[in-house]
Amino acid sequence: MTAARSVFSGFVAEHRRRRTLLVQPRMGFSDPVTMRRGLRAVAEAGVPAVGTVTLDSYTRTGQHDLAALSISSGVPLNGYPLVALGPAVTAELVDGLYGPRFPVQVRHGSAQPEDIFAAMLEAGLDASEGGPVSYCLPYSSVPLRTAAKSWSRSASLLAEQAVECHLESFGGCMLGQLCPPGLLVALSVLECLFFAEHGVRSVSASYAQQTSPEQDAEALWAMRRLCAEELSTVDYHVVLYTYMGLFPESAAGARELVAESVRLAVRTGTERLIVKTTAEAHRIPTVEENVEALRLAHATALEQPAPAAPPPGDTEVYAQARRLVDEVRSLAPTLAEALPAAFERGLLDVPYCLHPDNGNETRCVLDDEGRLQWWHTGRMPLPPALGGRRGHDRVSATRLLADLSYHRRRLDPVLPGARTGPSLIQPTSWE
């Protein structure tokens, strides 16, 4: 029996037909009253939007007893404690808001999400995100093989439901910044293939805005092409995240970076945009700041021309991602086995990621045009013809800090008399 289309995937499909960019905040509050106020504000913002319930760090790590203790003690958390509050509270939270005109996605950051998915489903929600790699390496010290087994059980649980539940890979957002697009695209597509392997029929591949609009466009087009080649039997769409790294500290700089992400999304035909706010550099945004950012993104999208055509032939980003996907899939009959094996052999290696199962041999830098380039590709199967490099010099701390602060240096004004610090250092030629 074919599962009915979920509220989430149906909403995305409707707006894809209309060629309307969907916008979505990253929003989570521990108090159900405040969380409901946030969801209501997004639902009533007057823009085509998806609601978000982002979970707290105790729930992310399975410490539901500590989340419950915080609730009973009146101690605020950094997100919504879905499991500790229980499905009935969450069902009441979304009652009258959640539906075909306003889907809600649960975002969590857990390497072992079984309890989270069970509580989400019991509350009547049908969409989440993450992945066995993308929610293990950046957020957890859990072994990658343990995370893969946990995510296998979790994805299978979603696939067993009467509705077609949706899973979004977080693979295109590894560490938020300084990860070359070829690897980000490959990881996101591989996680979507992992979900499909476990029976999930509705998926989305993600990509986080980096530092070069042209390179980012290449990445999004490469991702869509790979999805078309590899995910033709499932429903899929593409998601873009406004920059996930050090955000401009000025309100004007932050608004411009958000606007640039909108222009990138529309140019590439991306269906959904996860939007940041002007408060990102300073604190957790308020409900009002989230709504303001959504309205800015929607207004900017309406001003853009129709999507552009992708470049002909194989771009470097596509060629790198295609090689990595093929190499990983050849390691084992299933991706549940192949993904951990790929990291163990160094075929996948995320720059600057300190998780014990990541080789951490690779490095990357920004070139003079702001494009992310490999500096050292370790054992990854990327020859020089595909942009691979075996640099012998170390990337200096000064260079790393300059690369990390690229958008701040570019978009924040330098005030008269301001001190020159690491965030203002201009990188030298990457060669």
Image (cartoon, rainbow, N blue to C red):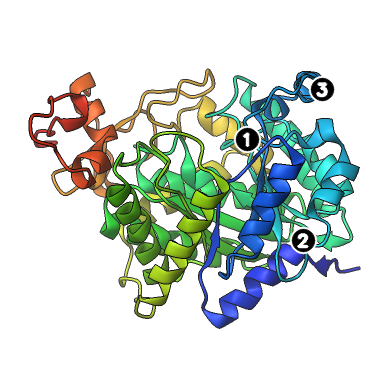
Of residue 69 and residue 349, the one placed in the foreground of this image is 69
Q: Residue at x 53, y 33 (%)?
A: 342
Of mark 3 and mark 2, the one earlier in the sequence is 3
Q: Are marks 1 and 3 in contact (CB under 8 Å)?
A: no
Q: Which residue is mark 3?
A: 72
Q: Which residue is mark 2?
A: 98
Query: Is residue 279 rendered to the left or right of residue 198?
Result: left
Residue 284 image position (x, y, % from top left):
51, 36
Screen quadrant of the C terminus: top left
Residue 428 position within the rendered picture, expressed as x and y whole percent measured from the top left = 9, 33
Crowdedness of circle 2 by 10 Å Cα count: few (<14), some, many (20+)? many
The answer to whether residue 157 is seen in the rendering is: no
Q: Is residue 98 visible?
A: yes
Q: Position of residue 348 (x, y in %)?
A: 46, 35
Q: Residue at 63% across / 35% down in the picture? A: 109
Q: Is residue 32 above or below residue 96?
A: above
Secondary structure beneath label 1: loop
How far apart marks 1 and 2 lie (CA) works out to: 22 Å
> Which is in the foreground here, disc 1 or disc 3?
3
Judge by depth and name the residue closer to the eye, 59 or 128.
59
C-alpha separation, residue under disc 1 versus residue under disc 3: 23 Å
Image quadrant in which you'd find residue 235: bottom right
